[in-house]
Amino acid sequence: MNFKQEIARRRTFGIVSHPDAGKTTLTEKLLLYGGAIQEAGAVKSNKIKKGAASDFMEIERQRGISVATSVLAFEYEGTKINILDTPGHKDFAEDTFRTLTAVDSVIVVIDVAKGVEEQTEKLVEVCRMRNIPMIVFINKMDREGKDAFDLLDEIEQKLNLKVTPLSFPIGMGYDLKGIYNLHKKNVHLFTGNSSKDIHSTTEIDDLNSAALDELLGSKAAGTLREELELVTGIYPEFNRQQYLAGELQPVFFGSALHNFGVKELLDGFVEIAPAPRPKKAEERLVAPDEKDFSGFVFKIHANMDPKHRDRLAFVKIVSGKFERNTAYKHVRLDKNLKFSSPNAFFAEKKKIVDESFPGDIVGLHDTGNFKIGDTLTSGESLHYKGIPSFSPEHFRYINNADPMKSKQLAKGIDQLMDEGVAQLFTLELNGRKVIGTVGALQFEVIQYRLEHEYGATCSYENLNVHKACWIDTHDWESEEFTDFKRVKSKFLAKDKRGQLVFLADSAFSLQMTQQKYPSITFHFVSEFEPLVQE
Ligand code: G4P
């Protein structure tokens, strides 16, 4: 197979959902189709169970699983599929946002009974902003849920999407009789125990045939015909270009638990989802089929063994072929690095590979060279954009609880921040360090890991911050800016990259500050087009 064919057969995507919608179950069924696992129940759930927030063994166990499920790769009918794991738990939302920079498309899972939930809204918004192609899978059709048309309406309203069903349910809950595949124009009957044998389903090719009445009963067959008439009347015809541009989202229905409607989803996905696409670097647009290798780090995972502090940096290959034992340029450090044991991922295993292609993820052993967002190339100085930090939700001072271990603490904090566990801000006024996180859970994770991996102990102190705002202005020497710095000196800090941040203590004070200093722009994301170009 030549280089271009290797790229064309790759599908790298993420599954996003609110916790409990069925992401793990669906992932497992997809792996079954790929023959990557032999039985249901093999993919361990990496959910942080409710109430387990302070159970550190649980957190460690989750970390162990999450490295195993970070990338699940398998072959399906000649297609190489890479599923990138995205934690559903809201405390790890930042992790999910970063992973979404490495996918070429996503599948959004929605629970038919619960409809559109909070986490789904947030994640879909991020995908929409980036024009990531999305397929919607409405799950748990074996249960009583919302009416299909109402749900499609809710998806359009709440998620601001434009949908078109590619499959449609025949009944629901106890009355679920099957799925009509609008794309392939056939009927797939639900036998109720299809989870036992993923191939035992009956198909009917013609919607108008009397055989449909025989199979479903004339009432259900009649309802289906009516509903399909409505579907084709209301929803636009599927158009792949619109889907790829993020302007149209095809919808599939099914039950992941019963492995029903999953094959329709997978076949549809393989057919329409994009192969790796060109990616914007600060310098230029980079196409996957360029000869020279380039890629970027979107995730760093610490070693589970505290005796070895090496880490695994996950690199998404954007262009060219990645080869083992070849020197690549680490652009930020301007230094060449060689990797003797790059890992590729297969189902739940990783193994050392000699070469990988665009769309693939390689795991590189790292002793502290990498930060999230770093670019690696064959030599060109490229910088991939788009791994911004968002304003954290929780802020606390971090103090050293053992003066003998201040070096260990500094190193630990440094490395955990590189991994993206939380964000660090250093106050301008007194150099005190503030940790900002998306969820309260991270504070406990940090404290635990500092102690177990670095031998350092820390304590926290509450700090009242409403939002971190990255600051920009046309004139950093202006009187207005000088006044702002003087008046607000207590609230100013630098982030890890040295960018100036205003830690607003309330929504009101932020509003007042914005009014008083109109020449200053306050961003809630760390990455923006600067007002003054260097
Ligand atoms: P998540 O990763 O999105 O958080 O969801 P997960 O797959 O873990 O599924 C959450 C719960 O929903 C699980 O039940 C799972 O069995 C169930 N589920 C998933 N898909 C379907 C479906 O199509 N139909 C029905 N009826 N249930 C489904 P649980 O009781 O929380 O866990 P478990 O004890 O079954 O593992």
Image (spheres, rainbow, N blue to C red):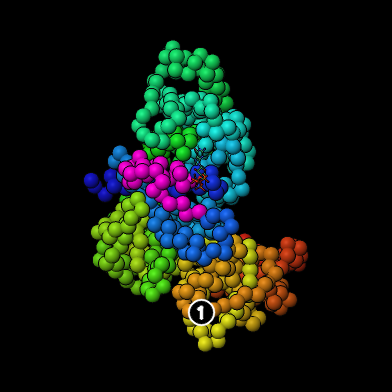
Task: Give x and y (percent) for residue 56.
Answer: 52, 65
Task: Give x and y (percent) for residue 172.
Answer: 54, 28
> Who is closer to the viewer here, 416 or 467?
416
Q: Is residue 80 visible?
A: no
State whether residue 8 is above or below residue 281. above
Residue assigned mark 1: 456
Give the crowd class for mark 1: few <14, some 14-19, many >=20 residues within 10 Å. many
> Who is closer to the viewer here, 53 or 514?
53
The residue furthest top is 210
Task: Give x and y (percent) for residue 394.
Answer: 63, 65
> Who is closer to the viewer here, 489 or 476?
489
The magenta span reads 23-47
Q: Give the residue drawn at x 71%, y 68%.
A: 505
Task: Give x and y (percent) for residue 457.
Answer: 54, 78
> Who is closer to the viewer here, 209 or 458?
458
Was residue 37 drawn as part of the magenta stretch in this picture?
Answer: yes
Q: Give the residue drawn at x 38%, y 27%.
A: 201
Q: Quadrant of residue 300?
A: bottom left
Whether disc 1's CB lies below 8 Å from ligand 1 is answered: no
Q: Give the residue drawn at x 32%, y 52%.
A: 346
The residue furthest bottom is 404
Q: Is residue 258 visible?
A: yes
State whether residue 14 is above or below residue 455. above
Mark 1 element type:
loop
